[in-house]
Amino acid sequence: MSRLRFFTAGESHGPRLTVILEGLPAGLGLVAADIDGDLARRQRGYGRGARMKIEQDRCEITAGVRGGETLGSPVALTVENRDHASWAGRMDVAPMPVPPEPLTRPRPGHADLAGGLKLDRHDLRDVLERASARETAARTAAGAVARKLLSAAGIELFSHVLSIGHVEAKALPGDLATVRERARGSDLSCADPEAEAAMREAIREAAHEGDTLGGVFEVVATGVPAGLGSHAQWDRKLDGRLAQALMSIPAIKGVVLGDGGAAAREPGSQVHDPIGYDAEARRFTRASNRAGGVEGGISNGEPVVCRGFMKPIATLRRPLGSVDVVTKEPFLAAFERSDVCAVPAAAVVGEAMVALTLADALLEKHGGDSMTELLRNVRGYAQQVRDY
């Protein structure tokens, strides 16, 4: 059974976003500053919209922590929507004396029409406010907490952007530490400086044309022990859980682990990772990591490597054709303030979702109501693996 659960609530232009995490052990050090750094990274990046300058996200811990440590009870976090003040009279919780003008022209590529049909809502703002990627700020906050838990167990995560539009990063450094350092120093989270410059130009051109761009990001988790996940049931397989977590991010249309799609085109001799043994370190080794750190639904001790494929943002300044859901007349789709490219931001959300998935799998494997118990179990299992 999963040990770590989280739920988010809140609308894009509502007063605040809320997330509740259940299943954290007692004794995990946690302060708001542990979360605010990831919230800030989610907002940065060339090609972001004007709202990023308004929000300046900060987290408030409202339950489950005392004296800078988790209590073992549910942890509640909130992130204020500063832009809510501009939506008075349109996003009030109480009945509004004058109903706001409904949004009736759905945007292709968004949840607007499908959600309106599902929920029988003719003001599509009732759908798009929750479907908005603004919700991922709450997930990023939850992921920062999961990151703190994983770090205590020796697991670290980072992300970097591999492509934006047709521009691909190719001159990547050979070691993961350098990739992480370069990506953190780039406002596009790209570890290839030449590709980053070309990406910026592609974003400028798309903005000039009133268009948007998608791309590919990679999340890497190091220090993941062998044994997380399961081969026994479909819903406990670690690769399946990671794929579902990443696919749940708005605009993500594909997920692969390791070599992913490329592996489908090669013979088995060029795809699978030969096994070796380091007698001095008393650990099994791999000459490559094409599997992305997961075999048979179980982590194998190598870095877990996931890629998310993000479609171009569906809100266009030059909107596509649509139909008014009330009059059924053809119209151009509604335009909501939006980004030109949000791939670097999606990469940060990807880190959060991978962190939450791995933290859940870690607690599932090792249990523990306190950090003392959890880390004792982690150390004991590590010794068991060395003695195998």
Image (cartoon, rainbow, N blue to C red):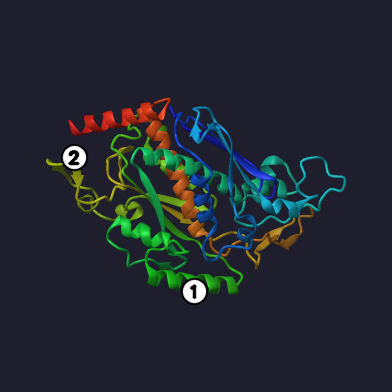
**In the image, is 307 to the left or to the right of 336?**
left
**In the image, is 193 to the left or to the right of 68?**
left
Mark 1 or mark 2: which is in front? Answer: 2
Label 2 belongs to which residue? 283
Number of residues whose C-alpha sits closer than 10 Å to that of mark 2, classed few (under 14), some (14–19) or many (20 or more): some
- Residue for point 19% across, 44% down: 285
Q: Earlier in the sequence, mark 1 or mark 2?
A: 1
Label 1 belongs to which residue? 201
**Whether residue 105 is visible:** yes
Where is residue 334 drawn, in percent x and y?
A: 70, 60
Amino acid found under the numbered disc labelled 2: Arg
Amino acid found under the numbered disc labelled 1: Glu
**In the image, is 221 to the left or to the right of 109?**
left
**In the image, is 191 to the left or to the right of 86?**
left
Number of residues whose C-alpha sits closer than 10 Å to that of mark 1, classed few (under 14), some (14–19) or many (20 or more): few
- Residue for point 52% across, 27% down: 73
In the rendered image, the vertical position of residue 385 relative to residue 116, given as above or below? above
Rounded to the nearest whole Å, what is the CA distance between mark 1 and mark 2?
Answer: 46 Å
Q: Do the residues bearing badges 1 and 2 touch, measured as CB atoms within 8 Å?
A: no
- Residue for point 35% across, 42% down: 155
